[in-house]
Amino acid sequence: MSKEKALDIVLSEFLELAKVPRPSHHEERVSEYLFQWAKRHGLAVEKDALNEIIIDKPASPGCEKVPRVIFQAHMDMVCVCEEGVSYDPLNDPIKVINDGITLTAEGTSLGADDGIGVAMCLYLLQDDTLRHGPIRAIFTTNEEDGMDSMAIDPRYLDGDYLINLDWETLGSLCNSCAGGDYFNFSHKAEWEKPVAGCKTLTITFSNLLGGHSGVGINKGHANALVTIATLLSMLQQGGVSFRVASFGGGQAKNAIPAFGSASVAIAANDEEKAKTIIEAFRAEFTEAFGSIEPNMVFTTDITNTAPARVLKGEIGYGLVGLMTTVPNNVHTMSPFIDGLVESSANLGVMSVNEEIVRFTVFARSSVAYQATQIGVICAALANSFGFTFDSEGHVPGWAVNPNSKLTHIACDAYKHLTGIDMIVEPVHAGVECGAFAEKNPHLDMISIGPTLVEVHTPNEICKIEDVKVTAELLIEILERIAQ
Ligand SMILES: [Zn+2]
């Protein structure tokens, strides 16, 4: 084996891994696959209670005193398929297509996020022609839907350097990420009968762009739920009383809602007033968002039948008032880095059922104070609208380390290999380095990886040349650390 073969080995490891089903929350099989892989290769391996795999490779001869480098990738993947494709994520392999230039999958997501990171680690663990100090590979579970590695035992993070391989842009190096807080707003649902003779107004927004609530928060996409609440507030302020019969939408707490719908009861003699307000809203909204949201579908419908039941007035008005005032968008921009969102909040999912009215806000911040401030605002608003507020969970952030040696080594190595300057950038999203920073504040970390396109969709693409460059970069970094 030699490093000239690095790309071939990475690709063959990726193809083997793709045969093992590995959706988030179901990592038992892939965890066992990686465990047995290490045994077969004669490497020390541990499996923890989270099914995470930790593999150690000793230093190459003469490099025993070189600091340990930890490589880390997550073993789970988002499993989605094209409409009409029969695919069972728990049992079916990913059928990888290699056309010599890109890797894609037949009808499903590819899982290069983060399978290609895993495959690169497996290459580094097996090539015994490389010169390096002790290497550890950590394969984490359920990164995509909860970040299990927040609970990793700190003793596994005993090293000097950590390279996270879950970054999706070659030529860019991530050196910091935002933390996050999940906030819940809720109120007991109390129902009553609507006034006799009222009508039902249904408002629906769909086909909005939505997107990631971190990296997409400054793109100006419309939030379906906040938009509906805004229209309802305008109706109320325009003298149209209503009672909420249903309200729901959003895809995930950490995504900008691309769809939402609400039904309210209105008095029959308010119909014309409501239509006038809706048309004024439509004109203004279309002017603001028409070019940003080209596929948007906005419909309103008034029927002569009353809803079966409605929320008590103060709950419905409280809900709408809260949804229109709660932080939702960019909160602060970084005073230090041009164009970087420092803190933000996103109203994510909401639902009204028999028992409860609730919605979530996911706040992100790279500065603890701004995170606290968003929390304080949310709590104060919930209180003034009579809602219950609670903080469900905290995802730790990862602050910039201005003395990071690893960043310099990686940038120099990349320039040496490609002649191009590496871009060093923080990100307004969560990466696993946040979890590790909290557990071992002395770890010098970076996040890098080959360019991946349209991850979490059946159109996911991984560029093979980028995999080659990334593998060479990892080898170069290891050798520079060993010097
Ligand atoms: Zn990932």
Image (spheres, rainbow, N blue to C red):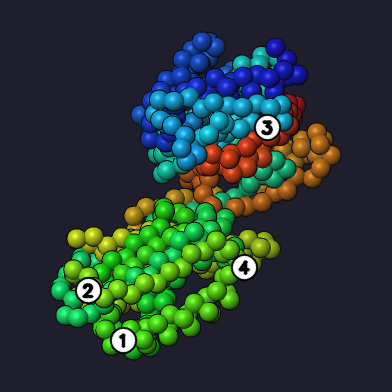
Measure the alpha-carbon separation of dots 4 and 3: 32 Å
Residue 445 placement (x, y as % from top left): 60, 41
Q: Earlier in the sequence, mark 3 or mark 2?
A: 3
Verify CB contact (< 8 Å) between mark 4 and mark 3.
Answer: no
Task: Answer few, some or many: residues within 10 Å of disc 4's Cα (few below 14, many 20 plus, some between 14 and 19).
Answer: few
Q: Residue at left 31%, top 69%?
A: 263
- The residue carrying mark 4 is 291
Discs 1/4, front: 1
Q: Amino acid at mark 3?
A: Thr
Discs 2/4, front: 2
Measure the alpha-carbon separation of dots 2 and 4: 36 Å
Of helix, strand and loop, which one carries label 1?
Answer: helix
Res. 144 visible in picture: yes
Measure the alpha-carbon separation of dots 1 and 3: 58 Å
Q: Earlier in the sequence, mark 1 or mark 3?
A: 3
Residue 40 placement (x, y as % from top left): 51, 10
Queried on whether the Cβ of the residue with tag 4 lies below 8 angstroms from ligand 1, the answer reads no
Q: Residue at left 51%, top 34%?
A: 108
Q: How many marks?
A: 4
Residue 341 placement (x, y as % from top left): 59, 62
Q: Which mark is residue 270?
A: 1
Verify CB contact (< 8 Å) between mark 1 and mark 3.
Answer: no
Measure the alpha-carbon separation of dots 3 and 2: 55 Å
Q: Amino acid at mark 2?
A: Ala
The image quadrant where one finds the N terminus is: top right
Q: Amino acid at mark 1?
A: Asp
Q: Which mark is residue 306?
A: 2
Q: Earlier in the sequence, mark 4 or mark 3?
A: 3
Q: Which mark is residue 286?
A: none
- The residue carrying mark 3 is 102
Q: Residue at left 52%, top 55%?
A: 211
Q: Amino acid at mark 4?
A: Ser
